Amino acid sequence: MRWLLPHPVISAGLLAFWLMASRSVAPGPMLVGAIIALLGGWALTLLDPPKVRIRRPGLILQLAGRVFVDIIRSNLAVARIVLSRRLPRRTGFLHIPLALREPHALAVLACILTATPGTAWLEFDAEEGWLLIHVLDLIDEEEWVRIVKERYEAPLLEIFR
Amino acid sequence: MTHLAELPAPLALLAAALVLAGAFLSLAGSFGLLRMRTFYDRLHAPTIATSMGISCVLLASMLVFTALQSRLVIHELLVGALVVLTTPVTLMLVARAALHRDRLEKSPAVPRAARPEPAEEPAE
């Protein structure tokens, strides 16, 4: 069973993805979806990803809700900056020391920071854990470091442990 | 588009408002791309379109087609998920290419590494 389905969750996700995309649960899409799910699982084995263990499902929901609210807030903030007559006072680079090393958790953090207008992930120094981001509205650097570390990094550390 | 006439008025209004809001936000994002001064500032503007702009349009699409076909239509969620998952890849690719170029040109405007320079660390 292990050789057939090395990554059951990913394979199930691929099957669900295919069925949603083809909007049908007829035998045809089912068959194609199953083949895609199997091939996807095998392909992932070739990439040899690090094992991931996810905890605290409640915290995941809480983080998702927080990100949802933050994305709306920063969308409105950036839209206001873009449409205002004067361009922002100060934009700039920001170095943030991260304790996060788990690749999956870093990927989630990258998605969060990128999906939020106003912050862009530039690069990450995996050895010492320095993250370089660019911030559109860099009024208070301490505040931004605190937002990233407390609002996003802390829950991710708990979830991917 | 005649089947749209079957849509109940409140729903049609809500969907129209969502589509308009999404279009407006996407326009604001593109406008920002034109308006911002430096390359790194410009990175931020289109994110409006790929986050809230697209969410509004997708939400409208889900509402309309769920109502018209009287069953839950959620494959729009796939579009949202794929956009959220793939935007960081392209953004990082573009941003790091720019960083690489600026560092090669020894531009003083960009940091030389992800780690802060020891001398300026306390001042920043």
Image (cartoon, helix red, strand yellow):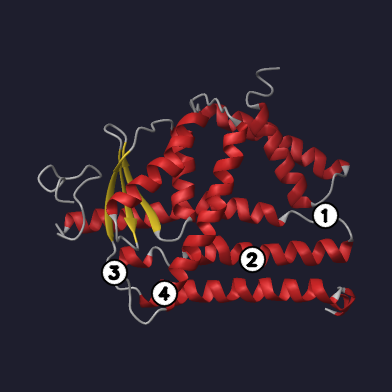
> Which residue is located at x 14 percent, y 59 percent?
B108
The residue type indicated by label 4 comes to Val
In this view, the residue in front, A37 or A160, is A160
Question: On the picture, is A45 further left or further right than B37?
Answer: right
**Residue contact at pointers 3 and 2, CB within 8 angstroms:** no
Is the residue under label 4 in contact with that under label 1 (CB below 8 Å)? no
Residue that appears at 87% across and 73% down: B8
> Label 4: which residue?
A82
* Secondary structure category for the residue under label 4: helix
Q: CA distance from mark 3 to mark 1?
A: 44 Å
Both marks 2 and 1 on one chain: yes
Residues beneath discs 3 and 1 located on the same chain = yes
Q: Position of residue A135 (x, y in %)?
A: 34, 58
Instruction: Report whether A124 appears left or right of B63.
Output: left
Residue B72: which disc?
A: 1
Marks 1 and 4, how far apart at CA: 36 Å
Q: With respect to residue A30, does A67 lie above or below?
A: below
Residue designated by label 3: B38
The residue singled out by tag 2 in the image is B56
Q: Chain ID for label 4?
A: A
Tag 3 subunit: B
* Residue B61 tag number: none
Estimate how packed mark 3 is, as few (under 14), some (14 to 19) or many (20 or more) residues with alpha carbons within 10 Å: few
Q: Earlier in the sequence, mark 2 or mark 1?
A: 2
Alpha-carbon span between mark 4 and mark 2? 19 Å
At label 2, counting other C-alpha atoms closer than 10 Å, the crowd grade (few under 14, some 14-19, many 20 or more) is many
Say which amino acid is labelled 1.
Leu
Above or below: residue A31 compared with residue A81: above
Percent coordinates x, y for residue A108 in the rendering = 49, 42
Q: Are marks 1 and 4 on the same chain?
A: no
In the depicted view, which residue is nearer to us: A138 or B29?
A: A138
